Image: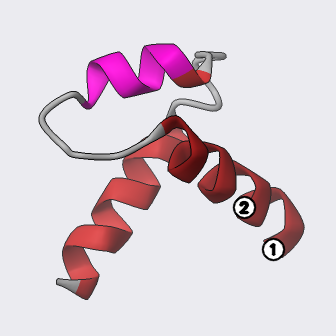
Amino acid sequence: MKRVINDVKEKILSFITDKKIYKDILDTMEHIKISLMTISNIMKNAKTDE
């Protein structure tokens, strides 16, 4: 399960370079049950970790 979570996070973070907005990311990953807030938190945590 941890590997899946890491893969999803990496995929979401890869969209940063594509300059996609959260809604675009959500639409792209519609097969994964994830909220806009979760995407936002992943992005914020990535910026904090750097």
Verify CB contact (< 8 Å) between mark 2 and mark 1. Answer: yes
Report x, y in % for residue 42: 61, 57
Q: Secondary structure at mark 2?
A: helix
The residue pinned by badge 1 equals 49
Image quadrant in which you'd find residue 29: top left
Which amino acid lies under the numbered mark 2 shown in the image of this protein? Ala
Quadrant of the image containing the C terminus = bottom right
Bounds of the magenta segment: 23-29
Q: Residue at x 34, y 46 (%)?
A: 34
Report x, y in % for residue 10: 44, 56
Q: Which mark is residue 36?
A: none
Crowdedness near tag 2: few (<14), some (14–19) or many (≥20) residues, C-alpha within 10 Å:
few
Which amino acid lies under the numbered mark 1 shown in the image of this protein? Asp
Give the overall secondary structure of the magenta segment: helix
- Number of marks: 2
Q: Which mark is residue 46?
A: 2
Query: Is 11 placed left or right of 19 in the picture?
Result: left
Q: Secondary structure at mark 1?
A: helix
Q: Residue at x 58, y 18 (%)?
A: 18
Disc 2 to disc 1, C-alpha distance: 5 Å
Q: Is residue 3 above or below residue 34?
A: below
Image quadrant in which you'd find residue 41: bottom right
Crowdedness near tag 1: few (<14), some (14–19) or many (≥20) residues, C-alpha within 10 Å:
few
Q: Is residue 49 above or below residue 25?
A: below
**Extreme left residue here?**
31
Q: Is residue 20 above or below residue 37?
A: above
Report x, y in % for residue 31: 12, 35
Query: Is 14 placed left or right of 40 in the picture?
Result: left
Image quadrant in which you'd find residue 1: bottom left
